[in-house]
Each structure stands twice: as C-alpha cells, then as structure tokens.
Image (spheres, grey):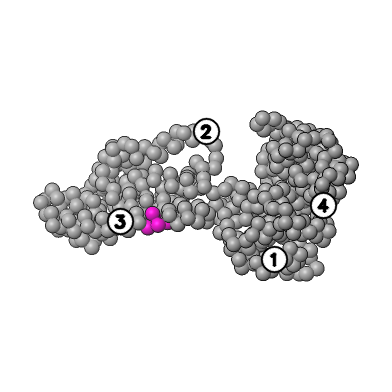
Amino acid sequence: MNLVLHRVTCPLDPFTVDLDLRFEGRVTGLFGPSGAGKTTVLDLVAGLRMPSRGRIALGGRVLTDVENRVRMPTRDRRIGYVVQEDALFPHLRVEGNLLYGCPHRVDTKSDVFSFMHVVEVLELSHLLSRSVARLSGGERQRVALGRALISRPELLLLDEPLGSLDRELKSRILPYLAKVRDEFGIPMVYVTHAPEEVMALCDHVVVMNEGRLVGQGRPEDWFEPDEGWRLKGYLKVS
Amino acid sequence: MEVDLLRTLRLSLGVATASTLLILPCGLLLGWLMARKSWRGKVLVETLVALPLVIPPVATGLILLWVFGRHGWIGRWLHEWWGWDIVFTWYAAVIAAAVMAFPLLVRSCRSAFAEVNPRLEQVAHTLGAGPWRTFFTITLPLASRGVAAGVLLAFSRALGEFGATVVVAGNIPGKTATLSLSIYSLIELGRDREALVLMSMSIVLAFAAVVAGELIHRNRRTTA
C-alpha cells in the first residue's frame, strides 16, 4: 500500500487531527481509543471531509492537496469504504446494494472482483433477494463488505466493521475479513479499538490518540498477550 | 349566473394539478438545498419562501398583479415580446395557487431530505455515484414518502386557494372560477343550495388529499 498523508491537519472538537504518515502494511490497523480521530482519517482519505492543510496521495495519484487546490471527487477515488454503521441502502434488496457500485453485473469467475466471486467468498447467494431490513448484524456487514469490493476499489477502508457485533458474531465474521484479505489482495486500512482484531488481520499498525500519531510498527511490537491482547502500556484504551 | 358543477370541478383540479407540477422541481431543489447545504442568503430565501404563509393571500395576489400585470416587471415583458397577458387567465390562477402552495411543499421536502441519513449519500459517492445519480437513486427514494405528503399538502392548498386567485385571476366562470371562487359567488347570489353542493365537493377532495397525506406520513413513521 502506498497511502501517504503529508502534514494533514483537520480541526475537530475538542482537538485537531494532525498527521504526517505513510501506511506501509498490506492491511494496516488504525488503532486508538474511541474519539481518537480514526474515522476522520478515513473520511479524509475517502474525500468525505476536507483537511484544512496537507496532501493525501494513493499510489501515484494525488487525492487531496489543499495548498495546490486539488480535490479529487469521492466518486473518482476508487476507494471502497465500509462505514461504521454499515449504511446499507434500506430501499434496495441485497442484490441492489451489491450492484450499486457496478451496475453492470459481471459474472466471470476468473475476475476476483466479479459479482459471482464476491458473492461466493462472502457466502451471500442465499441472501440476494432479501430485504436488508431482514438481515442479521453479521449478514449486514458481509453485504456492506461485498458492495465495496464489487466496485473494484484500489484501497479498502473498514471502519470498525465488527464494532457493533457481539463476541460470537465477531468470531464468525473475522474469517470472512481474513478471506477478503487473502483472496482479493487489496490494501486495507482497518480501524478498530480491539487489539485482537489487529492481531488477527493486520500486518502493520498505526496507533493514534487525540488526532495525533502515537507510533506505528508491527502489531506484535505494540500488543502483548493478556487474556486476549492489550496495548503494551503506551496508551490507555477506553 | 350559471355554474357548471362538473366544469368547475375540472377547472379546480386542473389548476391544482398544474400548480403542483409547476412548483415540484423547484420545491425539490430548494428543499434539498435547505436541508443539505449552507449558503449565503439562506435565511433570506427561507423567509421569502415562507412569506405567502404569513401575509394575507390578497396581499400576495396584489404582489402577483404588480409582477404579472400588463405594466408589471414580468407582465410587461411578456406583453411586449409575445403579446401575452397572464392576468385574469387560467394561467394566473395556476400561478396564484402555485405561489400559495410553494411554502408547504418546500417545508415538507426539506424535512423529508433532512431525515435521510447523509452517510448513505456519502457511501453512494464512494461507490462511484455522482450527485445526480445519488439524488435520484438514494436521496429521493428515501425521502419519497415525505415528498409525496408534501405534494398532497400543496395540492390541497392549491385546491382551496381563494384570496390571491381572486385578485390576480378574477372570478370568471368557466375560465378562472375555481371551486372556492364559485362557492363565494353563489353565496353572494343567495344560491346556498348550489354553494352547499360545491362546498361538499371541495370538502370530499380536501379530505381525501389530507387522509392520503396522513397515511403516507404514518407509513413513513412506522417504516423509519
């Protein structure tokens, strides 16, 4: 992944997000307590929010450059975003949601981002004609994930996709996320405040608090086992 | 004075339908702008749009007369260029009803759009949808019940419009005499029985529109 946030500043209440960092992992965990500014970072990358200063680039593409007045529209960024509250379109059925980002259904099995392949990997075939109101929490997350994948993104942003699920559901959905990581080979930024999710999915972790970078590195350098995992005493996670 | 009941009913329905259709695109746009965007002059526009609700309808009619009369700002231009006089025509009745119904439509559209979770629109953008596609495939369908309730409310208001219409369109039987105006004329002539028939017709129409609006609104609350 080559996602760079160069001297990005975005005022929030009661602190300012102020970051200068490069996301280095294939799956980077963006870790920090609630209200640390993690979702704001994803919104900045997706173009849903503008920084007051700085430059954001993905690969060779400049997405945002405040000083040079560059702002690539969100729709052109090719960044899949699974937002915290899943945000499925309630008036569309599951199939309608999945195909929203790619209205022309592609069923070639050799194409990893094809409708057929995504449906197969996430085991959604029996849900296609179902109304989204009749989906369970885990099913909703899988549909939201599939919808983002079918739009063929170059980067996938996942904002606490397991945050609203109970422990049992989390353990059922985690393997799907690992499958997506392994089968699609797409770089991901995974926002969470759960160390066990970072340990299970990420090869790199960025730790932030109150809008600032606390540090980054390999997950095993930041977390230690303790009835699960916990941060090595740098930061109190609320 | 002969009052053709069926013709009066048709005329009223035509005026109400035409005025509602006339204000619909503008009402949707303004409702969306008010719900979703911050812009300079927003308070002023909000106030101007709400004015017909609070000033006497006859005063609104007078303003329309100044604007669309042969010597008015727009009326003069229409007369000089096209030889077209709007005042005291069916079109004037439509314009008067449209102006009076517009605030109700805009307010309903505004609350309907404000109820749509903006995160859904943002997600649509991340999936490659531009503003128009997002509006027509996400925002409008999700706000449709509120918008439909607003349309019915505006239609009902247009159907019962009297004060502005009588000033700008007159009360010409078969041409601009809508249900309300005809009821007024019949009462003045002491023909209470015919007035009662027209009044019953307008009550049935308004009742049906309000009930339909209420049903849509309730359905919206239960499915929200």
* Disc 1 and disc 4 on one polypeptide chain: yes
Report the chain holding disc 1: A
Judged from the image, the secondary structure of the residue bearing numbered disc 2 is loop
Distance from Cα at disc 2 to Cα at disc 3: 39 Å
Q: Is A71 contained in the magenta span?
A: no
In the image: residue B143, left or right of residue A221 = left
Q: Which of B223 and B188 is in front in this view?
A: B223
Q: Residue A201 carries which label?
A: 4
Of callouts 1 and 4, which one flags the residue occurring earlier in the amino acid sequence? 1
Mark 2–mark 1 CB contact (< 8 Å): no
**Marker disc for residue B207:** 3
Residue shown at the point (68%, 58%) measured from the top left: A138
Q: Which amino acid does label 2 sit on?
A: Arg
Residue nearer the viewer, A204 or A104: A204
Image location of residue A130, percent across then percent down: 60, 66
**Which region of the structure is painted magenta?**
B212-216
Are marks 2 and 1 in one subunit?
no
